Every structure is written in C-alpha cells, then in structure tokens.
Image: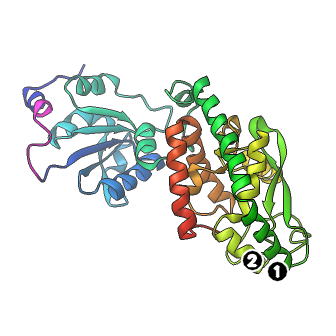
Amino acid sequence: MAVITATTAQTASRPLLTLPGWKRRVLILGSGKLAVDLCQILLDRQRWTTEIVGFLDRDPGRIGQRLGRHAIIGTYERLFEIAESHNVHTIVVCLEDQRTVLPVQTLLDFKAMGIEVIDGHMLYEEEAGRLFIDVLRPSVLIFSTGFRRRWITMALKRLIDVVVSITGLLALAPFMVAVALLIKLDSPGPVFYRQMRVGLRGHPYMMWKFRSMWQDAEKHGPRWADTNDPRISRVGRWLRKLRIDELPQLINVLKGEMSLVGPRPERPVFVQELRSFIPYYDLRHTVRPGITGWAQTKFRYGASAEDAHIKLQYDLYYVKNLSLWLDALVLVQTLRVMLRGEGAR
C-alpha cells in the first residue's frame, strides 16, 4: 500500500481556488489515442482553467516522448511520486491496454485524500458531448448510469411528436405547396422523393423528402453527397441549405416511424457498410430516428465513412442521455443551424 505522506495530505486539503490565477492541474494516466484526444479537448475547452501536467506510460523507454504539446513524464509505478511532486488536483485514467494492471491502491489513496480520480471515457463524454468508441469496452456501457427509458419520458416525447407533426403539417401546408411549385418549375420529376431508411430496431421504412436532386440522380448507384454536388438542382440547393427538404418527414413522425429528435436515419446500403467496421453502430437503432439530432447540431454534414464514425459518437451520446431537456436543446440549436445554413450539401 502506498504511504500517504504529511506533505501530500496537506496538498490534498489545500483549497483549490485560493488564487485568481489558479488552474486545475491534470495528470493523465495513459498515453493512447483516448488520452491524447482528451488532452486536446481539455486544452481547447478549458485552457484558462486547466493545466495538463503530462502523461504516464507503462514503458520506461517512452519517458520524454512528446504527444502533441505534452510529454510522457513517467511510468505507472511512479504515479504517487509524480502526482505529489507536481501538486496534481485531478488524475484521469485512460488505460486502453487490458493487460495493464491498474494501480488501484494508489488511486484509492488519492481519492481518500480528496484528489479527483476520474475515468477518461466519462470526462471525454462530459467535455466533448460524444462517446469515444474506438477503445470503449462493453462493460463501460453496460454499467453506466445512462440508457434509461422512463415510460413517462417516452410517452411525453411521442405526444410532443404527434402534436407538433399535426400542427406543423397544417400550418406549413401553404408554404409546402409553394415549395412544391418551385420544384416543379425548376426541374422535371416528382415533387417528393421517397427513400428507404433504417429505423427503430433496424426496421426499414420509406422516408419522405422534397426532391432536391435532378431526376435519376442515382442511376449509377447510391453514393455520399459531395460539396457542390452536381446532382443537386438549383432550388434543391436552397432547400438543403435551409433544411426545408426535410419538412415532409413530419409525415413519418406522425406515423411513428420517426421522432422530431433522434439519430438521423441512414440508408440500408450504408448501414451494412458502416456496421462492419464502426463499433456499437446498431445502438443508434434502439431509438426512433429523428428529423434532427444531436450530431446534426454538433458536427458538419456527414459525407463519408469517417464522418459517420464521428457522428455515431454524438448519436450514442444522445441515445445514452436521452431526455426531454436534451431534445429541447437540440431543437433550439437546430434553429441556429437552419438560420446560418451550416453544414448543408
């Protein structure tokens, strides 16, 4: 058992906000991708209140190696000594190698002394608003406090969906007629575009949209939308920029195939591709897909498998933390995205 020295005990009991220039001193236990990405997020979001002391690694040969702006300053065995000498306030555990033995007793000693010990995945979720899934073990999700489905929350969410979809379809009917006329005048073809998407529990359904591409735009097969995609019509470019092409999905919401807020539904051909190499991909199908979602307000338009990988991290954050409050936040941020025309293609 690690010995708790008088010096360390005094450090632990020292008030953290005694000076105006105080910064939380953070030591990161680990040096993998999670540790490096989390370090960058902390620097981006808390640079005025957080100071990264450095990383610890199990290999003594890596001491001194730089990972971005900070270096590996020691090994796990020297955790107690390094944390004490650097006056650490928070220890973030980002151990990705399952063969690594966690220094449990030392961490417990620090915890008892009032020094914060926090899981790297938890801190990443809190700071980034998404889950780091590349090295996420199933047990982290299984024993987490999220993924609650209170019946009252789900009932109210569905009630809101029905009321808003009916009200929206009636109130926006004249506007939608005008949009339909513009589409017909701009290019030949149908006003609406129906496309197969994957919904709740993986069941396929037909999603409605205003047609924003030229007719037969996918005669050579489905593909991701590109920046300045030549398949998009003149009117369609504005419909996409302002998200007006999504309005007919209120029909899907009324039918119970979609919700106002949820992960954006994907096409079956892309689902088959993405689930083969993105871990936990099918967890996004445990809730109804949405007209808008957390990922749509936090990340750019997804137009590749790499983008889908990042957007899934935001989708899983939503699935894990689903609540009416989060839905309200997404809707408010969606208005901002629509008014600014962000991320459209």
Q: Main secondary structure of the magenta part?
A: loop
Frontmost residue, 219 versus 290 = 290
Q: Residue at x 85, y 62 (%)?
A: 193
Frontmost residue, 308 versus 39 = 308
In the picture, which quadrant includes the N terminus?
Answer: top left
Q: Magenta part of the protein: which range?
A: 11-20
Asked if disc 1 and disc 2 are in contact, CB closer than 8 Å, the reply is yes
- Crowding near pointer 2: few (<14 within 10 Å), some, many (20+)? some
Q: Which mark is residue 235?
A: 2
How far across and down, in percent of the image, does residue 227 sit? 67, 75
Q: Amino acid at mark 1?
A: Asp
Q: From the image, tell me which residue sits under label 1.
A: 186
Picture layout, residue 335 above or below residue 278 = below
Say whether disc 1 or disc 2 marks the residue closer to the N-terminus.
1
State which quadrant residue 195 falls in: bottom right
Q: Is residue 109 magenta?
A: no
Q: Is residue 224 visible?
A: no
Left or right of 258 on screen, residue 192: right
Is disc 2 placed on a helix, strand or loop?
helix
Q: Amino acid at mark 2?
A: Val
How far across and down, in percent of the image, does residue 26 sit? 27, 44
In the picture, which quadrant includes the C terminus?
Answer: bottom right
